[in-house]
Amino acid sequence: MEEGKGGCITIEDAYDMLYMHIHREDITYKGKKYKKSFYFKDGLKCLTKIKVAQNEESAKDYMEGLIESNYIYLLNNTQNTNEIICRFHKDSPDHGHQPDKSKTWSLVLKQAKGNPFISLKGITDFKEKCPFVTSMYLDQYNCKLYDAIRPVEWVDPIPEGPYDVIIIGAGMGGMTAAIKAVQHNFKVALIERSYMGGEHYNTGMITFNVLEHCAEIIQKLNEAQTLGLEISKDTWKLSMKKVMEQVRQKRAHIAPEFCSVFSFTDTYGVDLYLGNAKFIGPQTIIVNSKILQYSKAIIATGSQLTIPKLEGLSDVPYYTIETIYNMTKRPNSLVIYGWGQVACAYAQVFQRMRIDVTLLSEEKKLLKCATSEGINKYTEHTLKYLGVKVFTGVTIIGIDNNKEGKNVSYAISVDVKGVKYVINCQAILIATPKTVGVLFDS
């Protein structure tokens, strides 16, 4: 057994003795109540009194060891040691947890023998709660991410009495609302049927900024040719696999810090339910067969991706803004179907990566939300200046597999203002604007 830092008594024995002797109570600190808790300073006194520690310094070593070993955790963030509040993990109310010896995404990947494209047929708990997710791309970085923001298995808390606030959706809006509600000492439940963090942390600004940074470096290399740097097609090579690995690595590092399921259950004391919410009566919601009562409800389901019904699209593989970061091979040509800020942003990024990009917009204006025609003209002019082929007012006639030609994968037939074209490409990205996402049964 491991010895404690302060002497011959082990950390395990120190825990058992401290748990038996120290007095726990409900402590109010800055307007928030911490149940079954005790002050750090009282832990030091108790360890010394029951002769686990010889002095205060030894007792401090034991307390730090108990915290490092996850027997105890700190409830508040303060530099004043007299105000530090602690709680035994054993005494914590269950706000939702992973079952003992539960499966991890790394184990799922291992069982798939390293194949990163995972079918979810055999993953019962996840499949029942996220029926719209049919497959996932797993590598070491996505495994780390999903273990934090959506574990393979999750046990919901047992509801005790009505909630002050129930929040449906754990994206940026829902998470912020939950934290603010807890700070006002409300009893809070948070419901998410997909991944914690929403678009911002998983497929939005966090990931896109890394991709754009890479594009900026490549563009600077291109511009450096005017200063005498010689770059030819024979000496220049971009590994899209490594670029996307960098994106996923950054995401796996940043997202869990802000939107881990455990940060909300352990740090904030939010009851977390992973499943699909359904309103069944006045101030009543059911999720995973559990009936929840509430005083107020916040719907924070954000937006959802809508796949357009294009002839032939279902018969060919394509990327969306949610799956583009799983790209493993750089295409020579890319067709982006969409309009709005997102479609334009991805068009310029991939064009700067020396990919031949064609942007097809069903709308006559690339930015429908723009307040002036000048903004649309400037946007279109900038994309064309970078080399993007832009077509607006497009009707897709059909999409076919093109088996002719070594470097061509798909043939897209389009009608542009009465003129018909066939556009060949190696990859397709659907980047149509998202729609308001009320992702629950009402």
Image (cartoon, grey):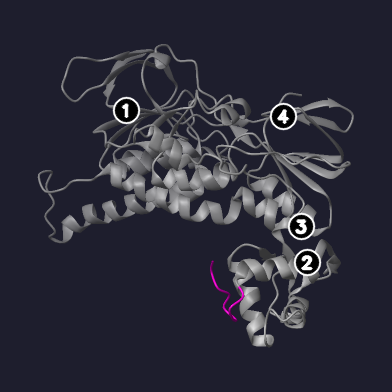
Other-residue count near label 4 (Cα within 10 Å), few / some / many at <14 / 14–19 / ≥20: some
Residue type pointed to by label 2: Met
Question: Which labelled disc corresponds to residue 20?
Answer: 2
Residue type pointed to by label 1: Ala
Q: Give the range drawn in magenta.
A: 1-9
Quick one: 406 or 358, which is closer to the camera?
406
Is residue 4 inside the magenta stretch?
yes
Return the disc, 4 or 1, that comes first in the chain's sequence. Answer: 4
Q: Residue at x 72, y 78 (%)?
A: 47
Magenta segment's dominant SS is loop
The residue to which callout 3 is attached is 91
Verify CB contact (< 8 Å) between mark 1 and mark 3.
Answer: no
Q: Residue at x 39, y 38 (%)?
A: 110
Total of numbered circles in the picture? 4
Question: Which labelled disc corresponds to residue 288?
Answer: 4
Verify CB contact (< 8 Å) between mark 3 and mark 2.
Answer: no
**How far, Cα to Cα, is label 1 from label 3?**
54 Å
- Picture quadrant of residue 424: top left
Return the disc, 1 or 2, that comes first in the chain's sequence. Answer: 2
Quick one: 225 or 385, which is closer to the camera?
225
**How far, Cα to Cα, is label 4 from label 2?**
37 Å
**How far, Cα to Cα, is label 4 from label 1?**
39 Å
Verify CB contact (< 8 Å) between mark 4 and mark 2.
Answer: no
Left or right of 251, for residue 153: right
